[in-house]
Amino acid sequence: MTRTVPPPTQPPEPDGPRQVSKFEYNLLRILKFLVGHFPADQGLQLVRTATTKPECISVGAVDLVKDVLSKALVLFLTRAGGWRNDKYLRNNTPASGRVWGRIPLDERTLEFSRPVLDFLFWLTAEKVHETKQAWDAAPKALTPTDELFFALAFDAMRSDPDVLAMLRRKDTFSRNPFCWLTAPQDVADPEATKPQAPDFTPMFGGLRAVLLECLQTHLTHRWIRSERDKGQLGDWKRMRHQGNAEFVALRDFLKAAEAARRADLARFVLRTNAAVLQSDLTPVFWTGGLQGSGPQRLADRLETQRAALAFPRQMETLEVWQERARYVGYFDDDYQASQMWKADWEAVNGDRVAARARAAVEMLEPLRGPIAGQPATGTGTPGGENPEGSSG
């Protein structure tokens, strides 16, 4: 994959070893930290430390930034799943092979824009957790590759609460769909009554769709780990916030996938549920770590427990997709796509997974859940309710 970056700000330097200033050296180390090639503790320390900013940086430093960005992002996407010999839809027809075999070069070219370099300048020059210098980038000004880079940067820094609080207030991250797919509980405003996910529609066309293909395995592993870790979460308020953010993100993502007729890009939702629901589970699997009796109101306790099951709730939507695919005829336009979805469903024994998910959810909703043994129905909204809705 190729890349473009802003032009150098100085005339080219002569050949030979590249000399960089202290500021440039710190900037390059921060960049390597953000893409996972530098120790996290040292990287966060650099982010929390200010370095005097020069008027511009050298051509040699710009070349090094370009080199790190291009190689690191390609390596990340390859490891995340791009290397797999898999099958995805292309013009509503299944296409097999690794990403570089399925997609023409001009459709998988990585392009970085000026906000990436401005962001690196800001991180290096400021103490980000207490900065007075405003920085942000309008989401519409970002390329798909920029969005992925900023999602990786957010993921690298979100373990620091002070830095996370600063980043969460910036549209670059709060409206970034990749951030919402990988860490909705951290990117969503914890003080908001109802989390608001970004528009996922652009994710299903052009380069963003190619990136999503590469990220399916990566997303599956992340969500499996997140679901298994919920059982260790003891804070009721945090559990409710996390569950509500996850529900909104996944619900809106699946709606956009259905509208774009790209069920193949929602495989990570199906595969995560299949991995987690390998046996019959009770809600305690997700809520067993909650400490104390929780909120005073029973309705609030029930809503928190329902929120914890945000991910298995998505199986209702996927089950609707499967039921619809069964009735697609040989001469229908979506026949090949529906056959591919049915193969994905059968590969994980989707009927059994859906039944287990439904049983777990109904244990918390004895007055509102469907009758046991009956197939789920819906309009694409798991549970048919707002994640912040009132309890039964």
Image: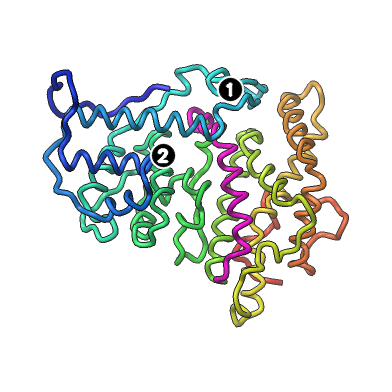
The N terminus sits in image quarter: top left
Image colouring:
rainbow
Marks 2 & 1, CB-CB < 8 Å contact: no
Q: Quick check: 191 left or right of 102?
A: left
Residue under the point 54% across and 36% down: 215
User: Total number of numbered labels?
Assistant: 2
Q: Secondary structure at mark 2?
A: helix
Task: Give the class, few, some or many, for how many residues have Cα within 10 Å of label 2's Cα (few <14, many ≥20).
Answer: many
Q: Secondary structure at mark 1?
A: loop
Give the answer, above or below, for where 168 lies relative to 322.
Answer: below
The image quarter containing residue 335 is: top right
Q: Give how far across and how far down residue 12 sits, in percent.
A: 15, 21
Magenta-drawn stretch, dominant element (helix, strand or loop): helix
Q: Amino acid at mark 2?
A: Glu
Identify the residue under disc 1: 98
For residue 147, which numbered disc appears in the image? Answer: 2
Q: Quick check: 366 left or right of 146?
A: right
Q: Give how far across and how far down residue 245 sits, in percent.
A: 54, 57
Give the answer, above or below, for where 77 lies relative to 333.
Answer: below
The C terminus sits in image quarter: bottom right
The image quarter containing residue 313 is: bottom right
Task: Give the class, few, some or many, for how many residues have Cα within 10 Å of label 1's Cα (few <14, many ≥20).
Answer: some
Which stretch did the figure color magenta?
Answer: 206-235
Q: Does the magenta portion include 101?
A: no
Residue under the point 45% across and 30% down: 75
- Front-most of residues 380 and 9: 9
- Front-most of residues 249 and 82: 82
Give the answer, above or below, for where 124 lies relative to 6.
Answer: below
Tell me which label, 2 or 1, sits earlier in the chain.
1
Q: Nearer the viewer, mark 2 or mark 1?
A: 1
Residue under the point 53% across and 46% down: 181
